[in-house]
């Protein structure tokens, strides 16, 4: 079994005992999403820590997008709830890369693939190199925007 999944379950127990509603509901939701990912497809499988980080990243992105949507809809209390859930999820994700680190990785990938003169046609090639390096550590949209900026 995954050590990250064990940690999530243990932290859920602690949150329930301390009556931390936000943390316990968020951890329940995350564990449900992990279980759903495990049973998706034709055969049940045990997720690795990397797979779980992918699920956590997806859930964190959902929270960010929902918070923005609630803000635009003048629902500040719901936006705050989504942000609080996002903070709980962020505790289990690897440290996020900042813009300078993403830029450096993209520059290195462009040099490695020789895509500097190809323009936007090389975006897929560069993203193919960068994506595994930033998985779970940066938003894919931010990475794609940086690749576009440097290629374009």
Image (tube, rainbow, N blue to C red):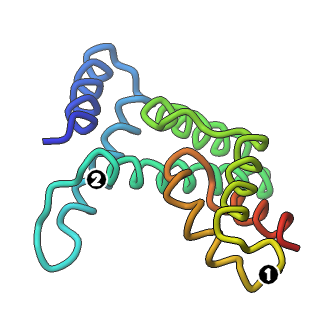
- Judge by depth and name the residue closer to the eye, 93 or 82: 93
- Judge by depth and name the residue closer to the eye, 139 or 20: 139
Vertical position of residue 120 compared to residue 48: above or below: below
Residue sitting at x 28%, y 23%: 16
Mark 1 surroundings within 10 Å by alpha-carbon count, few (fewer than 14), some (14 through 19), many (20 or more): some
Pointer 1 residue: 120
Pointer 2 residue: 34
Where is residue 54? Give x, y as percent: 41, 54
Q: Secondary structure at mark 2?
A: helix
Where is residue 19? Give x, y as percent: 34, 18
Residue sitting at x 69%, y 59%: 143
Furthest residue toward top: 18
- Judge by depth and name the residue closer to the eye, 48 or 16: 48
Residue sitting at x 22%, y 55%: 35
Q: How many marks?
A: 2
The N terminus, quarter of image: top left
The C terminus, quarter of image: bottom right
- Displayed quadrant of residue 109: bottom right
Q: Secondary structure at mark 1?
A: helix
Q: Is residue 55 visible?
A: yes
Query: Is 57 displayed left or right of 61 in the figure?
Result: left
Furthest residue toward bottom: 121
Mark 2 surroundings within 10 Å by alpha-carbon count, few (fewer than 14), some (14 through 19), many (20 or more): many
Where is residue 99? Give x, y as percent: 77, 44
């Amino acid at each position: 079994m995954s050590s990250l999944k064990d940690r999530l379950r243990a932290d859920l127990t602690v949150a329930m005992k301390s009556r931390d509603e936000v943390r316990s509901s968020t951890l329940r939701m995350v564990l449900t999403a992990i279980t759903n990912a495990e049973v998706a497809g034709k055969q049940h499988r045990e997720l690795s820590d990397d797979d779980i980080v992918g699920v956590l990243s997806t859930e964190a992105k959902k929270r960010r997008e929902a918070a923005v949507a609630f803000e635009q809809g003048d629902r500040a209390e719901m936006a705050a709830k989504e942000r609080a859930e996002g903070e709980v999820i962020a505790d289990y994700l690897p440290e996020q890369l900042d813009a300078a680190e993403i830029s450096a990785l993209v520059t290195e990938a462009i040099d490695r693939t020789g895509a500097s003169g190809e323009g936007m046609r090389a975006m897929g090639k560069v993203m193919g190199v960068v994506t595994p390096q930033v998985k779970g550590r940066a938003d894919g949209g931010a990475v794609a925007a940086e690749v576009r900026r440097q290629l374009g």
